[in-house]
Every structure is written in C-alpha cells, then in structure tokens.
Image (spheres, helix red, strand yellow):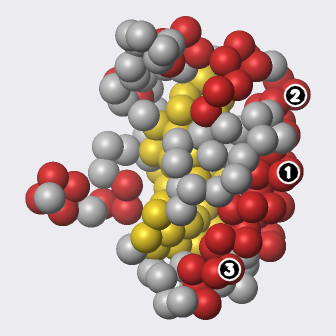
C-alpha cells in the first residue's frame, strides 16, 4: 500500500487525471497493491465555490471515466477523491477503482468547518445519505458506498 501526491492544477481535472494516471502506472510497475491519492485529487481541494459549478462536476466525472479507461490494464487499486452529486447533495468522496472498474464510492462523513476549512459550505456529510448506492452519470455506474469501503474489517481501519 502506498500514497502519492500528484502535481495538481485547481479545477483542471484532465491535467490532474493525467498526473494520477502516471503515478498509478509507476506504482503498478513497482508492484504496489493499493495507491491512495489525496481527497479531491481530481479537482484539487481548493476549488471553493467552484464545487457548485455543474461544469466542474461534469469535468470531474469525465476525467474519472478517462482515468478508468486509461488504467484498465493495471492491477493496482487506485483511490482518488472527487466531488460526487447524488440525492441533490454534493459529497466529498473517495472513489476506489481497479482494472477500469469502480469498486466503491465512499463519501466523507466528518467535515471540518473551522479556520481555513469550510467544507460544510460545499459538501454534505455521509450521515445524511438515504441510499446505499450512488449513480455516477458520466460512467453510468451505480456504486456501493459506506463507512468501510470494500467491507474491510473495522480493526484494520483503526490500526
């Protein structure tokens, strides 16, 4: 398991997805099983009110689709962050994928709202979800989400 911090450009999802792809390829070549990227890595964390622009959300989903297509030949599990809209709410989510397929989308539960953090201004807590599936329009995929992605046992998450 490894983590990577790609060079990102704010609201430039295509650029960010390309950088993420390069790092996934490098990790796969080194035998990494799981590569985790920072939250909101497809858009960059600092988009602020741009998170409510439909064009940014569409660009993020299109970039995810492209990333899935371009990494379908890799065995490494990737985890990228992106805004996901469902139930008329916007969630800060981690999308887990492998070999071109989405395995899970996990929305963030605890949103900081102090100092330089204003996540509650843009995002909704996962506590407010009423469904156990999220449909990503650009991918046509319906993905399960939950507090424990991929049904990992609770002790693993606490270690």
Residue 54, above or below 41:
above
Residue 75's quadrant in the figure?
Answer: bottom right
Q: How crowded is mark 3: few (under 14 residues within 10 Å), some or many (20 or more)?
A: some
The label shown at residue 14 is: 1
In the rendered view, does 155 fall on the left or right side of 144? Answer: left
Cα–Cα gap, marks 3 and 2 = 28 Å
* Quadrant of the rendering where the C terminus is positioned: bottom left
Q: Residue at x 46, y 63 (%)?
A: 3
Front residue (pair 32, 101): 32
Q: Position of residue 46 (x, y in %)?
A: 65, 27
Mark 2 or 1, closer to the camera: 1
Mark 3 or mark 1: name the one nearer the start of the chain: 1
In the rendered view, does 22 fall on the left or right side of 123? Answer: right
Cα–Cα gap, marks 3 and 1 = 17 Å
Q: Which residue is drawn at 76% across and 19% down?
A: 50
Mark 2 or mark 1: name the one nearer the start of the chain: 1
Residue 32, above or below 17:
below
Q: Where is residue 44 in the image (x, y as percent from the top left)?
A: 67, 38
Front residue (pair 24, 53): 24
Mark 2 — residue? 55
**Dot 1 lies on which element?**
helix
Tell me if label 2 and label 1 are in contact, CB under 8 Å.
no
Mark 3 — residue? 25
Mark 3 or 2, closer to the camera: 3
**Dot 2 lies on which element?**
helix
Q: Where is residue 13 in the image (x, y as percent from the top left)?
A: 80, 45
Question: Taking the image as drawn, is residue 136 in sight?
Answer: no
């Amino acid at each position: 398991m490894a983590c990577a911090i790609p060079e990102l450009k704010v609201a430039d999802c295509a650029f960010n997805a390309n950088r993420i792809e390069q790092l996934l390829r490098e990790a796969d070549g080194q035998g990494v099983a799981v590569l985790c990227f920072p939250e909101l890595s497809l858009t960059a964390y600092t988009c602020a009110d741009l998170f409510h622009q439909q064009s940014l959300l569409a660009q993020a989903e299109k970039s995810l689709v492209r990333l899935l297509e371009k990494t379908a030949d890799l065995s490494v599990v990737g985890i990228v962050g992106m805004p996901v809209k469902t139930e008329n709410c916007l969630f800060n989510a981690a999308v887990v994928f492998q070999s071109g397929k989405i395995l899970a989308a996990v929305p963030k539960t605890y949103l900081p709202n102090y100092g330089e953090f204003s996540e509650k201004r843009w995002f909704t807590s996962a506590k407010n979800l009423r469904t156990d599936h999220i449909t990503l329009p650009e991918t046509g995929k319906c993905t399960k989400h939950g507090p424990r992605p991929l049904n990992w046992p609770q002790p693993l998450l606490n270690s």
